[in-house]
Image (tube, grey):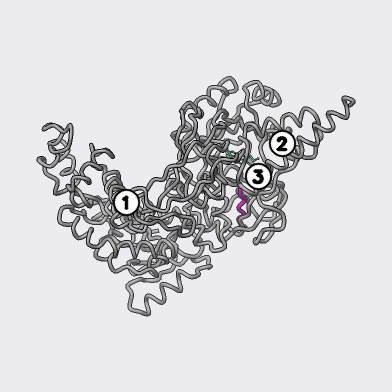
Amino acid sequence: MGKREKSAITVAALEKAIRRHNRLYFEKQSPEISDYAFDRLVEQLRRLRPDSPLLSEIPSESAPGTSRFAEVRHTSPMLSLDKCYREEDLNDWMDKFEGEVVASPKVDGCAVELRYDREGKLILAATRGDGVAGEEITENARMIQDIPQKISPLPLAGEGLGVREIRGEIYMRLSVFKNFKDSFANPRNLAAGAIKQKDPKKTGEYQLSFFGYDLLGVPFKTEWEKMQTLRSLAVPVVEIKKVPREKRQEVYDDFLGHRGSFDFETDGVVFKADRIEEQKRLGNTAHHPRYAIAYKFQGDSGKTVLKDVEWSVARTGVITPVGIVEPVELSGATVTRVSLHNYGLMKQKGVRIGAKVLMIRRGGVIPNLESVIEAGRGSVVEAPKRCPSCGAPTEIRDDFLHCTNAKNCSQTKVGELKHFVQVTEIEGFGDKLIERLYENGFVQDPADFYLLTKEQLLEIERMGEVLATKLIGNIQAKRELPLDLFLRALGIRELAKHTSKILTKEFGGLTRLFKVTEEELSAIHTVGEVIAKEVVAGLKKKRPLIEKLLKHVRIPSPLRGEGQGEGDRGKPFHGKKFLFTGSLLSMERREAEKRVEEKGGWVASGVTQELDYLVVGDGGGAGSKLEKAKKLQAKGGKVKIISEKEWKEMVGL
Ligand code: IVH
């Protein structure tokens, strides 16, 4: 076989492999190789056939013809980023332009464009799609709090269409993802699914975040200036550093060193030429702009073998599969156990004992079994018929395996106790101690902690006087619990940090919360029907525990919104709740909300009976909130509907 012929075959095979891995990653969301290995294939192709059309293709996020969203053609292509893994390659890139560079962490999420009209109102949101056209997700994007509904009007570059566009990344914070990690493999996939929900409220329930990295239609001199402008429009921007050229590697090392402290997954550092003039001169390829590059982190994935699957009972009664793998080194840590999330996801992955699997430690934080590379001939993992903790029969509901005796199952009870201690931060009570206290019958539910005596503690193995006294003191120190913490500590599904805070802010006290209806709850921004239902049912179910806890715990008077403590008592809006609707003419929404807070008031998240003022923007566009407030008024509710002008007078503007 001649040399030319041989390399032709290699090129075709490479292209085929790259296409396949792209489909696995983007459409099926189940990659078989690491990003690093994938990039090496692309690199090889680039060397063998620099003009391969595949090199300038942006892989589509969804299989062709499967979208239920309208197509949006981008005003200019939404490109990808070039990547590199070595300092030399970064240097080569940097040699092509002059001036400083800016660097920011690369956030693993989904690219979107947001269009704003002449008045600065958000009129359209779209995914990147294949880079030329994406899917319209406007209503879903409106449910993401980080995305401004309105920005202040800006000067346009030349004769524009009157439209400004912000581009950026929708992602899920790791602190939010931790509530979903039993059901989803990673935050990127979850965010990708969450922005494409049929019902925008569902998108809202996922509490997605956003940061902007580009602003089109406005003239700038530097990238740095562009980011400051984005920031001034109340658009969150990711941490960005202006870097003298010689400090480039230092900045990369620094981001790499503290990647674990970010509340998002990051897989590299994005460098950009700071001067826009230089950016223009460099231009774009069909795939990426030449003025930017992602210098990626590597070495956080590895292949290993699945040895066994254990089943662990969570406090909710859900029985989760945990994979036991041959030790594998990932980002400097040896991993031997990995959550397989839930029964359904495990089945879907085709997990068998002895399978060769790909492990990834994303964002340097969560080890994940990304996919099965070779299933092998080992036994298929079946769900246990009986609960490993209490022996009761199990059942499969949706994708989850449940203990049918969750109410009395020891593991769920112990899980409940651990959760209470963790949320209330009662110090000194590790898992083992809690298990002993439960087995000995000293602590059966969270309220029993407050009844625990030193004598009981001394019955526990290896417990001494000093430690026992200290532990009792630690419990006593937590006799006062703020309402949001109290709510979260109850362990009601769906009542995590965010929702507890919102309920506290909206309803202020337990008396009111006991009466709250599903309808009222789901009227609140980001609280959808599913959460509303779980919360109402959960509060009812936990009522006996709540009553018991209240014999020992005091809940201080309601926590106000941020920065609104006791010091706000003398202020004119003290205790008053405001909500804005429609478009404000005099200032941006966030500015108006700030003014309310400065005057001691607080900004509500939805129209509820607690609302004092609904402020209707003079720019029009008030919708369902206004309708709802009118209905409440008709029923004798206290809410006052005022115009933007009237509100300005109240504020003294
Ligand atoms: S700047 C080409 N900065 O990663 C547009 N992008 O994999 C220039 N991304 O298309 C983008 N973090 O959607 C920029 N700090 C960051 C980023 C970032 C994530 C996304 C972006 C880009 C994709 C490429």
The residues bearing labels 1 and 3 have C-alpha atoms spaced at a distance of 40 Å
Residues rendered magenta in the picture? 111-116
Give the amino acid type for the residue marked by disc 3 in the picture. Answer: Leu
Most extreme residue toward the right is 2
Query: Residue 269: x, y in percent?
Result: 57, 32
Question: What's the residue at 50%, 49% (across, down)?
Answer: 184
Q: In which quadrant of this rendering is ligand 1 seen?
A: top right
Measured as percent of width and height from the top left, residue 350 is found at 57, 46
The answer to whether the residue bearing label 1 lies less than 8 angstroms from the nearest atom of ligand 1 is no
Secondary structure of residue under mark 1: loop
Q: Which mark is residue 24?
A: 3
Query: Which of the two discs, 1 and 3, labels the residue nearer the N terminus?
Result: 3
- Decide if residue 598 is in sight here: no
Is residue 35 toward the left or the right of residue 409 in the image? right
Q: Name the residue carrying label 1.
A: 390
Say which quadrant the N terminus sits in: top right
What amino acid is labelled 1 in the image?
Cys
Examine the residues drawn in magenta and state their main secondary structure: strand
Categorize mark 2 by other alpha carbons within 10 Å: few (<14), some (14-19), many (20+).
few
- The three-letter code of the residue at mark 2 reads Lys
The residue singled out by tag 2 in the image is 280
> Which residue is farthest bottom?
634
In the picture, measured across the screen, residue 604 lies left or right of residue 617, that is: left
Q: Nearer the observer, disc 3 or disc 2? A: 3
Q: Is residue 155 visible?
A: yes
Dot 2 or dot 1: first in sequence order is 2
Q: Quadrant of the C terminus?
A: bottom left
The kind of secondary structure element at disc 3 is: helix
* Circle on res. 367: none
